[in-house]
Image: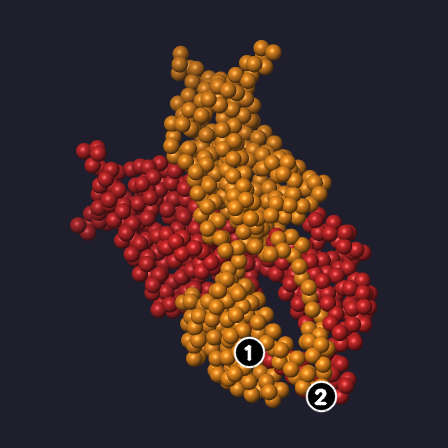
Chain colours: A orange, B red
Amino acid sequence: MARRAHLAAGFRRVLLAELRQIGARPGLMFMLAPFPLLLFVLLAAVFQLGLPRELPITVVDQDRSTLSRQMVRIVDATPEVAVTREEGTLSEGRQRLLSGEAYAVVLIPPRTERDVLAGRRPEVVLFYNNQYMTPGSLVARGVGGALGTMAAGISIEARVARGADVESATQSVAPVPVRQSALFNPSLEYVQFLLAAVMPTVLQIFIGASAALSFSRDRQGVAGLGKSLRLGGTLLKTTAGKMAPYTLAYLLVLWGADALLFGPMGARFGGSLAFHVAYGVAFVLASQMLGAAAALIARDTVSALAAVGVITGPAFGFTGITFPRLSMNGFSDIWADLLPVTHYLELRTDNILRGAPLDISMPAFGWLLSLALAYGGVTLLLLWLHGRPRSSVAKAVAR
Amino acid sequence: MIAAFLREIAVAIQAIWNDKGARSTMLGATLFFSVFFPQPYLSEVVRDMPVAVIDQDGSTLSRELIRRIDAADAVAVTRYAADMPSARKLFLTRQIYGIIVVPPQFERDLLAGRAAPIAAFSDGGYFLLNSVMSSALSNAARSLGAEVQVGRLTASGVDMAQAMAIVEPLRVTTVPLFNPTGGYASFVLPAVFVLILQQTLLMGIGNLKAGRRSAGGLSTFADAIVYVALYSLWAGVVLVLLPWVYRLPRIGDVVVMYAVAVPFLAAVTAMGFAVARLIPSKEGVIFFLVVLGMPLFFLSGVSWPAEAMPQFLRTVAFAIPSTTAVPALVRVNQMGAELRSVETTIFVQLALCLAYSMLAVAAERWKKKPST
């Protein structure tokens, strides 16, 4: 009983020492909660619309007929785009693309109306900027759909003129209609898609960096790691005591951001709350251990931070949220598995978006726990290695 | 005077080489990130995304439709599922990324001239997979539908040209420009490379200058010249050489590129001095920059349209060089924009350079006062 109380006291001593360290550094305190939440608000503002609307496009109407003007009206009426300009020539239209004032140019060539009436199948061309892929493909889908509707209308008229009834003419315009529905996130909102994924990725940087700073500071300090180890008594108590304030702070930030996402921002939560809490804790611990291990491997604080930056900074590309993991090369696939955030985002998708049964999420959850244990193991091992010689040196100095 | 200036230049170059942090960010990190960052995207497009089919018709035409879907580069029909629950199970375990249902009597309806709809379920949680599925599907459905229609019309005695004119009286052609294959690396990397230049340059200056006193105007000016010159070389590497190595489309004029890049790098350098004077610790500067990387990428408007952001945010974001420089350099390099299309950006960068220089000087003065 006394022994247990002693161990708990070790944990408490390290915890209090760490809290004092944090208290003495306003920059660190800012980094713990206000800064990540501020970034979340910034990102939420970036994606506030959920779906872009009224993206500017240009029309080059060389026909100037009733039909062409009707086309421009229909295109302008689609919610995704707004016809902000009309140009006389294609090269002027191209200039708008190059200066970034328009995402697409619709070219209606001369004699379009006449050729339609004569059955010569004229061609309307939609040029869109695919270098800016997100707005480009949104514009292409919107304008393409509007022009398709227009062509379908003409086709129906032609069939009715040939004696078909409206009902069957309408059916024959789209003989194989595709009723596509998204199984999850049906409204295709970017808030659910990007914001919910970007926030944990940014947090992983914070969590890793704070752990790295905490261990590097001790290691570079006069007393070395030995002081913290003596305070804690055991390696595990020392690590737990040092990390606990950060674990708590970042869990609160993680869940605070979720509270905003699922509360005021109206994202749907479709899964198990208990499981969400469980993998959230595992994610924070794994990211902390990653940062701690990096700090103990690196030579100084700046290198430790740089190492964490190199590992966690470009992580988003590896998570497979934007570009899917199934198309990645072997290196990226392995690297992705070593990042806590990859598995955390997969678990989030499974649980919140898909409402998948828990057994399906077990492999990813196992990964996350294994990463926490593996990085934690490396941390403890290095702590043991570094702690011993340093503390004996410190003792020698004290003598 | 000139000799003194040249001496300062030599000192500035040596300072980069002698400071381990500066050497690893300004020389090492720039190269490392530009090789490491592209890795996930190098295959450019999704190929053979596995999908499952529930063929409830089992007819010649349903099989023909499935064959056409499978023929698309982007998807591969890998599973035939008996019913929705079993297909859903495959979906949840990520063995497939889409489900296609061909209902019974698909062939009969199609041949009778009635609409024969098919259902498709894709994943709204992954946008790229979702759009891959929808384009593969609509192409297959449209081509099969049009063929059956034309066949029916010609069978009823209409000549081919007229049948085509009825089925498709107005041809709508969509032409993707600048990134014709829709490659993901081609889309992301040109923008990311510019951001890597900015972030590593800022980190390097932070490493060298954070918490240190200015060594005088001439020395600071020499430092700035060295940083801009070094990063102009890097700009050539990451914006011209690397796109060539990774086979990304690049059609821009190198002269125009430098007309934007040099003012941009000057603005970043000035900002670096200002940030280093305002945030006194090296660790603070580096951390701040690592964390801001991703938000700055989104603010540049390359992946998420600037038009969809609140006006207030767009105005504030103007203060960061990358916000306008990233799209401008992408327009020059990838879209072949001429000088007049990016003039505004050049002026914005020069203005930022001036503003940050003044801020850096002011911060220095303000710091000196309390101590004297």
Q: Quadrant of the N terminus of chain A?
A: top right
Whether B340 is drawn above or below B190: the answer is: below
On the image, the x and y values in percent for residue A296 come to 49, 30
Coordinates of residue A391 in the picture (x, y in percent) = 46, 19
Q: Which residue is mark 1?
A: A124
Please tell me which residue is depicted at 78% across the width and 72% down the height of the picture: B109
Q: Residue sitting at 53 percent across and 77 percent down? A: A71
Helix, strand or loop under label 2: loop
The amino acid beneath tag 1 is Val
Q: Is residue A98 above or below residue B95?
A: below
Q: Quadrant of the C terminus of chain A?
A: top left
Badges 1 and 2, same chain? no
Is A323 positioned to the left or the right of A42 in the image? right
Q: Position of residue B357 (x, y in %)?
A: 27, 49
Q: Quadrant of residue B232?
A: bottom left
Question: Can you tell which mark lies on residue B159?
Answer: 2
In this view of the protein, can residue B79 be seen by the observer?
yes
Q: Residues within 10 Å of mark 1 (few under 14, many from 20)?
A: some
Along the line of sight, the residue nearer the viewer: A334 or B109: B109
Please tell me which residue lies in front, A71 or B217: A71
What's the chain of the residue with tag 2? B
Mark 1 belongs to chain:
A
Q: Amino acid at mark 2?
A: Asp
Q: Is residue A327 visible?
A: no
Residue appearing at x 67%, y 54% in the figure:
A183
Assign a secondary structure to mark 1.
strand
Q: Quadrant of residue B58?
A: bottom right
Q: Is residue A368 above or below residue B229?
A: above
Q: Position of residue B120 (x, y in %)?
A: 70, 61
Q: Badges 1 and 2: C-beta atoms under 8 Å apart?
A: no
Q: Measure the C-alpha gap from mark 1 to mark 2.
A: 24 Å
